[in-house]
Image (spheres, rainbow, N blue to C red):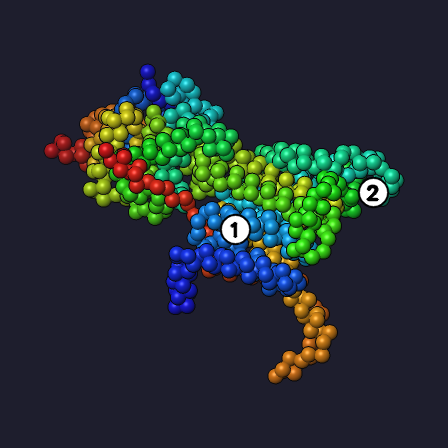
Amino acid sequence: MVPLFFKQLLEKLNRGFWPYAIILGHTTLGTALVYTTPRSNLAFLTLITSFFSLYWFRADTRFKIVAGVLLALVVIPIVGVRNIFYLEVIFQICLFAALALGLNIVVGFAGLLDLGYVAFYAVGAYLWAFFGSQQYFVLHFAPGTQPSNLPFLLPGDAFYLFLFLAIIVAALTGILLGLPVLRLRGDYLAIVTLGFGEVIRVLANNLDKPLNFTNGPQGITPIQRPTMPQAVVDGFNDLLGGLIGHPVSTADMYNVMFYLFALAVIIVIIFVTRRLDDSKIGRAWTAVREDETAAIAMGVPLVRMKLAAFAIGASFAGVMGVLLAASRTFISPESFSFMQSIGVLSMVILGGSGSIPGAILGAATVTILNLQILQGFSLYLSELRQSDAIIPLINFAWRDLSTQLDPAKYQRLLFGLILILMMIFRPGGLIPAKRRKRKLASVEAAAEK
Amino acid sequence: MALLETINVVKQFGGLTAVNKVNFRLEPGQIVSIIGPNGAGKTTFFNTLTGIYSPDGGEVNFNGRSLLKLRPDQIAARGISRTFQNIRLFPDMSVVENILVGMHVHLRQSPLATLLHLKGFKKEEADAENKAVELMHYVGLRDVGNELAKNLPYGAQRRLEIARALAAEPLLLLLDEPAAGMNPQETEDVTRLFRSIRDDMGTTILLIEHDMRVVMNISEHICVMDYGEKIAEGTPAEIRANPRVIEAYLGRGAVAGQHEEKLQ
């Protein structure tokens, strides 16, 4: 009864002027809350979920675009520099959303279970980490023994060039790894990609000898960022300084910049994915996913289509790798573990395999759960532990609560649980993939004649 | 010149010879049936023609060129299209999309045109969609373009599979038990459909079928297989009278009985 009532209510709210009111209300409320209480998790959640109402409610596309642009380009940067942690969370959401979108092409569209996806992320990251740091001059030194006055190989602005190079290099890596692998089906493919993913990480870990390419487990640092003209910082301060309330430093500005880059990349990715999905290539991918034998009998070149999916998915991860390396200025093999691959995969599955909004929602949900909600709980519990509070009725002092009980550590447990529940109750994901409805009425009528 | 010609085609699985030295010729514009008991190697023969299996010996020539060492998708591009014994649609794609996949080899759109939605791309997509709907109507499906293939009833799925195969504009259409599981009315309808496909589009049709009403009604030529070998070939009338065929279907005793009947 309750879900039905809820559904009807939502339907009612999705008509007339209601969507506009809700979207405006939600966004304004979120903005105001975050603006006034920059440390509240709840406020941040309200703001972030306003993107969801913007997506979900039916409203004029132009209205949606204007609202989305204002939210993403004005509100987020302002509240982001007021509490830089929020900007970090949003940046991570963007990173993972891009990865999830890339993996969605491989797993969701083409149906190739890839358990080593972060390998391509690593390729992009190490590409810029090597050329954008002093690593070239460290080649002949064992890790930790290099002199401190080494020059940089390339200027920081080469970053822009490497964003594009990473697309090519990651795609080529995808093809290279894909060629021997993609003749396999199902479980075998999953196992081999898992192996390849580990190979890339182990390579990163061990390529510090005979020539020191990756600096081993210590990782590469410092990695350069593109230059930030003082004029941009000043301009930002002049324009929005009043709203922000304190002068913005160059470091803060970098965070804004990387957020904007990540956003731009995601928009490009969504664009490319949607266009490809609705073409011969996208249909071939889905056909391969649905039935390989039938697809090849209809003239779909299996290996070439699978390679294309692999390469395109890989190139998205490659670009994001470059962004990661530059934004962190530090890269180590740890960032590219098997658990990361699984994490991105669970985002895709949670959101809805084959669904573009699903992949983004999945990435946002998992990241926020990780960085905000669970951490917030942990913080709250540790505060309680330090207080004299007592749980009433059972007379239990919070102080005696075991320090092992730390929600942030239960991340995996919680995801496992969520995934199990999803598979039982909503196997299509949060936003299940839908086939495009074509307007066939006129075509049918024409064909009748 | 024969459209399709196989010379001594052999296909083995371990110790089992599923197709044994089959020589077969198919003239353009014909409707030909392959019949034979279960396990006679008919579907395996189809699979060797379409490249899903590569033959262990012999030659397969189509339209004057050898099909050996080609991948199934290359063979499809040469003009052989097929349906499957157990329907193999793309269940989670819509009806129109299923047919569009069939057109894969004919769509010329480049990745760049796809990304930029160039004029040529849009036109090609619109034309393809129109053609898909036409084919849908042609096989007798109406107003189901946006339905998912898995939601169609059984008979409609069989028809959709034929539409998908026709979308590739094949020279040769291979149908693997197209009337299996159909009631007499549906069987009659599809039989008429096959004949009109040949008459309208000039497509050569080779079908495997167990339903003798279909086979005898539609075929101009029949090829009988048993234990991987071609045991007989000829017009429906010749096949009906051929003792080896009756023996293969009904056993040796049946033929003997028939013989005795004749004596009396």
Percent x, y for residue A110?
50, 41
At 71% from the left and 79% from the top, the residue drawn is A388
Do discs 1 and 2 belong to a common subunit?
yes
Quadrant for residue A325, please give it.
top right
**Dot 1 amino acid type:** Ala
Nearest the eye: B79 or A359: A359
Q: Which residue is mark 1?
A: A67
Q: Is label 2 in a helix, a strand or a loop? A: loop
Q: On the rendered structure, is A127 left or right of A114?
A: right
Height in image: A240 above or below A153?
Answer: below
Q: How many marks?
A: 2
Kindly identify which chain the residue marked by label 1 belongs to. Answer: A
The tag earlier along the polypeptide, 1 or 2, is 1
Q: On the rendered structure, is A152 left or right of A375?
A: right
**Dot 2 amino acid type:** Pro
Percent x, y for residue A24?
50, 57
Q: Is residue A224 visible?
A: yes
Q: Quadrant of the C terminus of chain A?
A: top left
Quadrant for residue A170, please give it.
top right
Point out which mark residue A143 bears: 2
* Foreground label between 1 and 2: 1
Q: Quadrant of the N terminus of chain A?
A: bottom left
The reply to whether dot 1 and dot 2 touch (C-beta < 8 Å) is no
